Image (cartoon, rainbow, N blue to C red):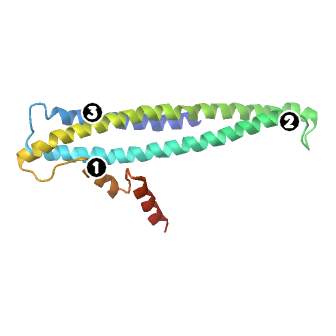
Amino acid sequence: MLTPIIIKQIVKLAKGTARFDAMADSMLEKFELGCPPAGELQRIIAQKQQIISALTQVSSVINTITKIGTTLNGILTGLNIAVNIIKFLPIPLPPFSPALLATGPAVVVDILGDLVKAGKGAVGIIPGALKQIADGIAALIAKLNAIDGLLNPCLLEAGLDGSINNSDLSTVLASTGLSSNASVNEATEAELLL
């Protein structure tokens, strides 16, 4: 039940990251023969900003899935402990007689134990899958930085104002309410809670 939902979200993230990676590759190819014309530079900048915006959304989804996985893991661990305790109770609990405990509730406890194991298996795939996506995002960020290095001299050559650098990325993230600085995030969250 849980596995298809998790897999669907992870596949969606992986496909999105791969699509943006292909876009970054296509942008890099435009610099192979030198600086593209000014109009093409502006299109590259617009595409790059779209990718940055999408990466912000992907990061949000990854954080949400990670939090859900952590929460579910804690719940499933607690359920597993409860199931094991119930299985090894030496006395029947009222209103159950020993005969009833041996059949009806014992079967339910076994089924619950199986469901908990399946849930833990589904939740267990989250960290590995998200690591693969995070590695893809890191490679994509490296490509975006390479594009910055190619764009800036071309912008100067074309006489266009405004080079692009990592502070631009920080500005975009800050405008969306996200920051790589934890204290800025805490201050923003505190303002929202007031």
Check disc 1 and report its element: helix, strand or loop.
helix
Find disc 1 in the rendering and name its residue.
169
Find disc 3 in the rendering and name its residue.
22
Residue drawn where x is 16% and y is 49% of the image:
163
Position of residue 48 measured from the top left corner of the image (x, y, whole percent) = 24, 44
Front label number (3 vs 2):
2
* Image mark count: 3
Q: Which badge, 1 or 2, is on the more N-terminal residue? A: 2
Position of residue 70 measured from the top left corner of the image (x, y, whole percent) = 57, 42
Q: Residues within 10 Å of mark 3 (few under 14, many from 20)?
A: few
| Dot 3 amino acid type | Ala
**Foreground of the two, 90 or 39:** 90
Check disc 3 and report its element: helix, strand or loop.
helix
**Foreground of the two, 27 or 168:** 168
| Dot 1 amino acid type | Leu
Residue 121 visible in the snapshot: yes
| Dot 2 amino acid type | Leu
Q: Residues within 10 Å of mark 2 (few under 14, many from 20)?
A: few
Residue drawn where x is 42% and y is 37% of the image:
12
Q: Residues within 10 Å of mark 1 (few under 14, many from 20)?
A: some
* Left or right, residue 142 beside residue 135: left
* Left or right, residue 111 beside residue 52: right
Q: Which badge, 3 or 1, is on the more N-terminal residue? A: 3
Specify the quadrant of the image occupied by residue 84: top right
How far is mark 3 from mark 1, CA to CA?
20 Å
